[in-house]
Image: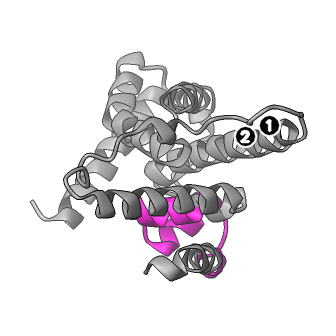
Amino acid sequence: MPAAVARAATTVDDASLIRAAQRGDAHAFEKLVHAHDEGVLRLAMNLLRSPEDARDVYQEAFLRVYRNLHHFRFDCSFHTWLYRIVTNLCLDQLRKRKVRREEAAVLPGDNGPRDRMDSVVEQRADNDPQRRLLSQEISVRVRAVLDDMTPRERMVFELRHYEGLRLRAIGDVLGTTEEAAKNCLFRATQKLRVALGDLA
């Protein structure tokens, strides 16, 4: 089945499930959650890089969908509406982390919060020590740049490069224009290029 046909079929199925759930059909709501739960968890995990935070966002996102589904009016796709909820929750988490990092930075003798990615072992480069060292250096710099990006820049960068969304869809998800998303992505990419300049 071509991708466009599959998307259209999903949209039709979503519409019928949403209408049934809006009428109080709990089974329809469960099917709607099941149809989108993997995508929501993957998005939250890609954006937050923390299984615990991603699960919290996942639960909160579907709780908000349940509470607000009766307001859904089909003026955008359910996917866009749902991703907007998830990205807003992730933006809140990223902002809280930034505040916590800044607060932790002023405490004497404290190394600050640890990034869980520090404990992930790079398997592919193990056979070549030089490649492993370069890979680790790139990972450290990418993490540092992502941490220094504004929450919106990071969100746009991750939605584009990890979720594969087009700029127009990113604009829809973030409630902004395609042009604003494009400018934000450009700023984020420039920061990454500067950080990786001598390694490229």
Is residue 6 left or right of 53 when viewed as pictured? left
Classify mark 1: helix, strand or loop: helix
Nearer the observer, 42 or 138: 138
Q: Quadrant of the C terminus?
A: bottom left
Q: Give the residue number, with chain letter if any, for mark 2.
A: 97
45 sits left or right of 38 in the view: right
Q: Residue furthest left?
A: 1
Q: Is residue 88 left or right of residue 37?
A: right
> Can residue 163 be seen here?
no
The residue that label 1 is drawn on is: 100
Query: Seen in the image, is 163 located left or right of residue 147?
Result: left
Q: Quadrant of residue 94?
A: top right
Q: Quadrant of the N terminus?
A: bottom left
Nearest the camera: 200 or 181? 200
Q: Residue at x 76, y 46 (%)?
A: 98
Q: Which residues are magenta?
A: 156-184
- Residue 112, how many percent across, how many down? 74, 36
**Residue 114 can be seen, yes or no:** yes
Residue 158 got which mark?
none
Picture coordinates of residue 158, whole percent (x, y): 50, 59
User: Which residue occupies 61% across, 72% down?
Assistant: 188
Give the amino acid at mark 2. Answer: Arg
